[in-house]
Amino acid sequence: MKNNNFYKNKKTFFEGWYFKHQSKDFSIAFIPGINISKDGRKYSFIQVITKDSSYNINYDFKDFSISEDRLTIKIKDNIFSNKGLILNIKHKDITVKGRIIYSDIITVKGDIMGPFAYFPFMECVHGVLSLSHKVNGNLFINNEEVNFINAKGYIEKDSGKSFPKTYLWVQSNDFKIEDMSVMVSIADIPFLGFEFKGCIAIVYYKGKEYRLATYNGVKLILYGEKGLIIKRGAYKLEIEIKNLSSQSLLAPNGGEMIRTIHENISCSARFKFYKNKDLLFDLESHNTSFEYVGK
């Protein structure tokens, strides 16, 4: 599976994938990735985050490989793909061993970045690989077994040089309605010497995808550490964030994983979605993931 030619001449670059899994009372995400500094030094890593703790494990770059279609990532004895995970993480602070299988993946129609996906100077490029899917399997985390039976998962990825200096990110597919998912990312985007506020958002509801994004005319009414209101045409999305409990993660800055951010992998939130004055849904989620990095 070794196919690392893509990274051969890159500098000041990162790439990471986010695999989230949630059952009724437990959430865990794994973030495999690579980091290439400005002087060309390379290494790979896996970050692990739960509601109560987070961990970062570094590996040699030679332990990393990726498939031709870039959908299967291997770091030492760990495999991450859109079909599932095989994990054998051994670290002084955490061990994770087990296998998880994915099924019934709901993908995005086209690229979430829209036309911005083709701009070569973007600081960070975002992708959504699965809005929602079923998760089955079991993990042994520090020898304690965790079972996933028809649980839910989500997959996304980021690549580039740095995370935006200020941004908001929220994601949930934990609703009483089956096959429903919401993802929103709002950030200050540097581009060709100036800066603009960019937004990409998807509401997947009753088999239909609603896109609210900068490139199709979204308006940012407000956003911050307590939630957001955005609007595009007849559609309005309101999210209220509650009960935050964050853990620290490393994030890229100039290609190097030297910035600390804080993520809530499993907080409570209320989601409202309108078409004109008609309320399409008003739902609570208790496994919402949320990050807010302000100025």
Image (cartoon, rainbow, N blue to C red):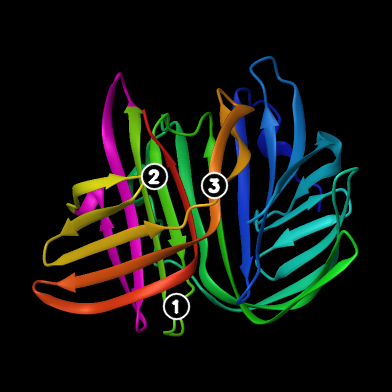
Range covered by the magenta-colored residues: 191-216
On whether residue 46 falls in the magenta region, the answer is no
Instruction: Give the residue pinned by disc 2.
Output: 168
Residue 58 location, x and y as percent? 80, 36
On whether residue 203 falls in the magenta region, the answer is yes
Tell me, for residue 175, which label it has, or none. Answer: 1
Residue pictured at 39% horizontal, 55% vertical: 112
- Asked whether, in this view, residue 217 is left or right of residue 147, the answer is left
Disc 1 element:
loop
- Cα separation, mark 2 vs mark 1, equals 21 Å
Residue 260 location, x and y as percent? 59, 32
- Cα separation, mark 2 vs mark 3, equals 10 Å
- Asked whether, in this view, residue 254 is left or right of residue 118, the answer is right
Quarter occupied by residue 154: bottom right
Kind of residue indicated by mark 3:
Glu
Kind of residue indicated by mark 2:
Leu
